[in-house]
Image (spheres, grey):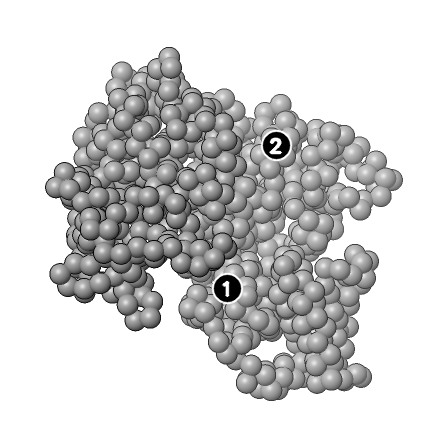
Amino acid sequence: MNGQPFQTPIEYLKGVGTARADVLKKELAIKTFEDLLQHFPFRHIDRTRFYKIKEIQQDLPYVQVIARLTHKELLGEKHTKRLVAQVQDETGIMELVWFQGIKWAEKNLIPGKAYILFGKPGSFNGKAQMSHPEFDLYSPEVLQRKGNMTLQPVYSSTEKLKAFTLDSKGLQKLIAGLLEQHAKDIHENLPLYIINQFKLMGRADAYRNIHFPEDAEKLAEARHRLKFEELFLLQLKLLKNKLLRIQKFKGNIFDKVGPYFNEFYHNKLPFELTNSQKKVLKEIRQDTQRGVQMNRLLQGDVGSGKTVVALMSMLIAIDNGFQTCIMAPTEILANQHYQTIKSLVGDDFVEVALLTGSTKPKGRKILHEKLENGELKILIGTHALIEDKVQYKNLGMVVIDEQHRFGVEQRAKLWRKNIVPPHILVMTATPIPRTLAMTLYGDLDISIIDELPAGRKPIKTVHFYENSRLRMFGFMKEEIAKGRQIYIVYPLIQESEKLDLKNLMDGFDIISREFPLPDYRLSVVYGKIKAAEKEFEMQRFVKGETQIMVATTVIEVGVNVPNASVMIVENAERFGLSQLHQLRGRVGRGAEQSYCILMSKDKLSHEGRIRLNTMVKTNNGFEIAETDLQLRGPGNIEGTQQSGLLDLKVADLTTDQDLLMQARKCVEDIFAVDPQLVAPENQILNLAFQVKNAGLSWDKIS
């Protein structure tokens, strides 16, 4: 196998063949020997203990018993046929039953013989029972073998795999065969000094012990080694790519702060910057003076003032003779950025233009000309900005909003809009826990705005059950009497779309009766209505012509109505934490006290209760994101699904945060001394980086 056995297609493994290979590929994405080796057990069962029949309790997960078969018989007709047997030890009697594999079990079970039985205990008619147990004829040798096999791996399987006898036991057999044949071909991929520094188990031993551990201690060591390796190689890839980019892409130097920035800062900025905003501006300022392309992620909650920081960074670029642009994922968001920036800079300070799919051809033509001759300094738009016909004279700074909605290719297109790639500032209002950000955006520098602008009052959040609805209506009337506006949001989930729309319409009817014309006016918005109608209703609410906006989650991103001070979320238990946090961020945009009311049914799941309590307890997006990560796991956090970076086999970003920090620090220390990985002891890492970057198997080139 030319020293690269782990890339061998799975059908060539003894005991697999074409049919089993097909089902392994379809069900578990196992295509090669390596994929099978990395199908790790999700738990192990302790096979060291033997129970007496009278000790067996139903709530035990699995038990092992030595007992003698006293009786067996076939019962039932063709479709209800089952094999029932009875076994006995000195403490009692237990029944065994088979509904499948009857022929084989009947042939191999001999009354009068003793067996070692293993299975999940249950009871039938008050008696101990075991369905489909594993069994071996008792002998001192088998007993010793079972006693030595301390921890038995349990693998995830599927119904289709079971039809090919590839249940947990079948997979165990294949993996045992693979290790027996090829454990000697598992090569080390970490330098000896790292293995010694972190007291790591060798790689081949780790693979053997994660599947078939000698004892619980060895299993823990194996898991630790493979988790560290996985996180270390991921960070090696991210940080090495960052270094390569710094070497490869020179950046424009913004060496001065000039009239645009100073005029805006001293005379136009309507409020004092927070310390957090000043710190981020300083970081951006340092980045843009180094002659290296900036790639920075700016994280901050809704309303924390990211847009002002982005604008001031753009003004530095303009002071240095460059053009700038902001790319947003939707027209609504692009429009909002345009309005915000126009209101901040005024009309005659710097030219700002908007380019979206709705821009008329005549307007586009003028816009293109002004871009090409350098007259237009700030362009805001959707991905219309990266179309080939949009040409800049000298693009120096690009701001990307909600990065996870744009692919890498779309970002790269913006880079190519200038001979020297522009500096990139990525903004997100989705707070991401630090460990997750280090993995998802590990190749970017990260800045965080973690304080709200002065004068902003934290939003008060309460959780009401259905029996408090009248109290809620009373509160709404008080707020409307003060001249405020209110959102009422209903969940809309594809699987239950019809039912959700009915809930929305029923809710709308109840609210219409409770808040009748002419004293109250309502808007209603949901996904199925025409875009023009939606826009009309949104605008009525924005202008204050309606006081209550009843909507599905379509308003989650992009509407800025400073006068709206109450957000009511119906069926709040059905929303995820990050969604609830985003919705809450739609209010609290003015100087008035704002409120968020979470309405839920009386019966809540444990998780649902944690989510709603977290919302009531804190307004801090990062705390909320941490809880969200613990509840849902990293793969479900917004934007991570398509990243491909979180396809971790053993490590878990929720529980292995300390290990990730260790691995990251170790990689940073190595690059500080040997950025090219040319030292003899780091050759192995250079190879590991090439493997990880190319998406190859380690063993393919070892």
| Quarter of the image where the N terminus is located | top left
Left or right of residue 686, residue 399 in this image = right
Q: Amino acid at mark 1?
A: Ala
**Residue name at image x 47 percent, y 35 percent:** 24
Where residue 562 sits, quadrant-wise, is bottom right
Helix, strand or loop status at disc 2: helix
Where residue 16 sits, quadrant-wise, is top left
Q: Position of residue 23 (x, y in %)?
A: 50, 36
Pair 1/2: label in front: 2
User: Is residue 231 or residue 210 the one in the foreground?
Assistant: 210
| Quarter of the image where the C terminus is located | top left
Q: Which residue is mark 1?
A: 454
Q: Which residue is mark 2?
A: 409
Q: Amino acid at mark 2?
A: Glu
Q: Tag count in the figure?
A: 2
**Residue name at image x 37 percent, y 51 percent:** 654
Q: Are marks 1 and 2 in contact (CB under 8 Å)?
A: no
